[in-house]
Image (tube, rainbow, N blue to C red):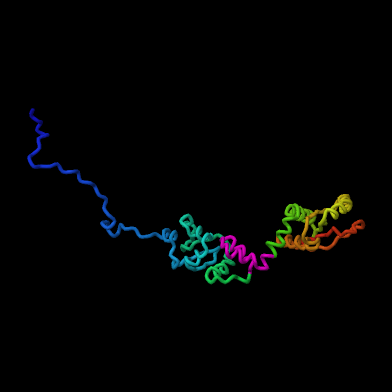
Amino acid sequence: MSLPANQIKEPGKQSQPAKSLKEPSQEALPVNLLKEPSQESRILCPDPAIVVELNVGGQFYTTTMGTLMKHPGSKFSEILSRSARHYKDAQGRFFIDRPGTYFGLLLDYLRTGQVPTEYVPEVYQEAKFYQIHLLVKILEDMPQIFGEQVARTQFLMGVPNYRENLEVLLHLARAEAVAMRSSKVVVCVVRTEEEDAKCVEPLHILEAKKTPVVKFGPWKAGPMTEDFVCCLEKDIRAKGYKVTSQRYHLSRDPYTCFWIFVFTWW
């Protein structure tokens, strides 16, 4: 049987395999098409020698990538990351929307390792914000922070409804200040359950006289009444108020549980 003409092979001629298509190698590409590492990629794999300019709340600082990245896990990794590339000022500085007053002291610590001895409470807040955990721990052992964070704060956490009653006290002080240069609020401070029971009758007397009064306590253990009053005054002044306190004696109050807080407005 004869084959069709298109299937007849010429003698000695073999079929050639199809040529495979190859992607041009990078070496074959023109020089102008080769990509160099971008600034973003350099930040993701930072060179410690890269100079970084910062705008912290309008104050300018210049440092190196190595200084900012000295403590792993700090907030600077986030600030200098790709997601933060748009947070730059008109001159290309990385912008941090936070007051820069004490940033220089924090930056000096990153550069030298020397722990600041001035403005310790303020630097402590900066270290917490930027998540410099080692510096936070060191500062918490210093007297200025230890006394506030460990002693006073821990004590006040044991006083029931302290923050709520503090706000009530300030509300009453403002309410009594209408057309007055100063206003007064009576504060009842009871340390023990026994003192609490003995102050019931005097509290009824003050209520009958429509005298504004706020009660704190009792608490289980810790500082005395005078120490608590000192803590209360400190927290009030920290909110910007001018306040003084003194004992407030009632004819039927032999236990001196009452104090009067005087707020001066002008």
Residue 175 in the image, given as x and y percentages of width and height? 78, 53
Tell me if 125 is positioned left or right of 40 in this view.
Answer: right
Point out residue 177 in the picture as x, y percentages from the top left corner: 79, 56
Classify 214 as above or below 66. Answer: above
Viewer-proximal residue among 127 and 233: 127
Tell which residue pokes out farthest to the top in this image.
Answer: 1
x and y percentages locating residue 107 in the rendered image? 54, 68
Q: Which quarter shows the N terminus?
A: top left
Quadrant position of residue 47: bottom left
Q: Viewed as shown, does residue 61 lie left or right of 149?
A: left
The residue lying furthest to the right in this view is 251
Horizontal side, residue 181 vs residue 127: left or right: right
Residue 32 sits inside the magenta stretch: no
Is 127 in the magenta?
A: yes
Q: Quadrant of the C terminus?
A: bottom right
Residue located at (14% from left, 41% from top)? 15
Secondary structure mostly seen in magenta is: helix
- The magenta-colored residue range is 119-146
Quadrant in which residue 59 is drawn? bottom right
Residue 266 can be seen, yes or no: no
